[in-house]
Amino acid sequence: MQLNEKSLVNDKAQWLAAGYKLPQYDRAAMIERTKANPTWVHFGSGNIFRAFQANVVENLLNDGTLDRGLIAVGGHEAMEKLFQPRDNYNLLATLKVDGTVDKIIIGSIAETLTTDAGYDADFARLKEIFAKESLQMVSFTITEKGYSLVKGDGTYADAVAADLEAGPAAPQSYMGKIAAFLYARYQAGQYPISMVSMDNCSHNGTILFKAVDTFAKAWAEKGLVDTGFQAYIEDESKVAFPWSMIDKITPRPDDSVAAMLEKDGVEGLAPIITERKTYIAPFVNAEEAEYLVIEDKFPNGRPALEKGGLIFTDGETVDKVEKMKVCTCLNPLHTALAVLGCVLKMDKISSEMKDPTLKKLVEKIGYEEGLPVVVNPGVINPKEFIDTVLEVRLPNPFMPDTPQRIATDTSQKLAIRFGETIKAYAASETLNVADLKCIPLVHAGWLRYLMAIDDNGEAFELSADPLLDTVCPMVAGIKLGDTDVEDAIKPILENAKIFGVNLYEVGLAETVIGYFREMIAGPGAVRATLEKYV
């Protein structure tokens, strides 16, 4: 069985016999309607989009709620090697905690395009799509760095600087292209649109707006666009940039899942390694749980996505949901397991949840240290959310997620995932920072992780992180058994950019140093320290 139109028609009985759910709508008619009058374009064709947004649309096409699908925009390799050879079909394997697998063929993507350099026809087609009055929303899962206009030194990236000077005719930067597409819409009739960032970054809509508005201002000041374009971008009744919060775990496609699908008779599932060394495959494996909360700002209307489980609400509620998830109820627990799992030489998040000490640690971080500072957003109950995380999501033995994956970029995560809780304790009249015991354990565990020596005393490879070159040299001279460590790690503990606070100023540095000393006492000391304090 091949994942393409011909096989899904000719081998339909075989697909069904193997337990695959197939599209229940007239796909050819859907594609024709979508191309003629599109309603939703999505930039970023990665795993979470294929497992979540595309599947939501698939379900709504199947039940007749929607009659048009998605136009997906991504890198040319994904489009040419993954999507287009398979007639834009995708395969989703939802791995449930009871061991069953939902196998779904997703046909909701009607058209695939790229914004990569040299694909002028695709660029022109996207301008044509943006000029369609029918278009209601444009969404993004391009990671937080996708919205950045600057280099590490704070100056504009070369492509951005060139685009700000040259105007919208042929931009090379990603956000420059987005601004150019919106200018095409402005020229077509100043039609309203909602630009929805669905990336995991705080106030994501505002980040997207600032990037686009930078181009609108520069182009207007230089006379490169109509004078009204900037006002169009800045008018929420015309162009809205709602906030959103997304949550679904979609790990790298796993070999065991591929083997299961191949046993069913599905062919052509070998992964594709792109020029950028990213790993993509014709299938996505994902957990069942999913949340997408969006600020309900859609000046041109929107599809009835609430019927597919999406939650539409006000911006204040989205903000509360995001803080609940990122700062207390999920992401801190993930980071704790990631850092300590690497040091303890564990290879699965689910395996860590079978470890009584680690399980108790994240329970304490969530329920005892985090939950007291959570503001209930109303649309999702925080305790019930943590219950699901700890009882269903993280322990799922069929989810091939690893601490090594989650440990990526930890230095960029600590400030939000733990720093906000520390700040809330410091500002509270009833809570005391000194009562925090498990969060400092994670901080000490991260310092121990930076030594790149596991709890058996053996070297391991650290996950990618932009600050490794800065912080690793600070711990490089520390050896197992050392006790005189404060001078070496003090610059790290004082760094409010890493932890969200200066740990000395809030009174947690001494606690972290004490834990760290115990964790480096010798082989097995990390395990012993956790068991002592948890």
Image (cartoon, rainbow, N blue to C red):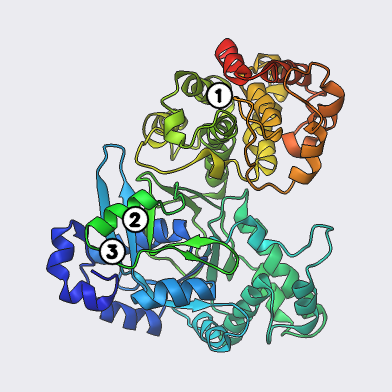
404 in relation to 266, above or below: above
Q: Is residue 301 visible?
A: yes
Q: Are marks 1 and 2 in contact (CB under 8 Å)?
A: no
Q: Quadrant of residue 56?
A: bottom left
Nearer the observer, disc 1 or disc 2?
2
Left or right of residue 10: residue 271: right
- Residue 78: x and y in percent read 48, 71
Indicate the amino acid at tag 1.
Ile
Left or right of residue 6: residue 469: right
Q: Which quadrant of the rendered structure holds the N terminus? A: bottom left
Nearer the observer, disc 1 or disc 3?
3
Q: Quadrant of residue 189?
A: bottom right
Q: Is residue 424 visible?
A: no
Q: Which mark is residue 231?
A: none
Which of the pair 162/420 is nearer the observer?
A: 162
Residue extending furthest toward the right: 487
Identify residue for label 3.
105
Q: Are marks 2 and 3 in contact (CB under 8 Å)?
A: no
Q: Which mark is residue 258?
A: 2
141 in relation to 85, above or below: above
Indicate the amino acid at tag 3.
Ile
Element assignment for label 3: strand
- Residue 144: x and y in percent read 63, 56
Residue drawn at (76%, 85%) of the image:
224
Residue extending furthest toward the top: 532
Quote the CA–CA distance across marks 1 and 3: 39 Å
Which label's residue is closer to the chain start, 1 or 3? Answer: 3
Nearer the observer, disc 2 or disc 3?
2
Q: Which mark is residue 365?
A: 1
Indicate the amino acid at tag 2.
Ala
Q: Residues within 10 Å of mark 3 (few under 14, many from 20)?
A: many
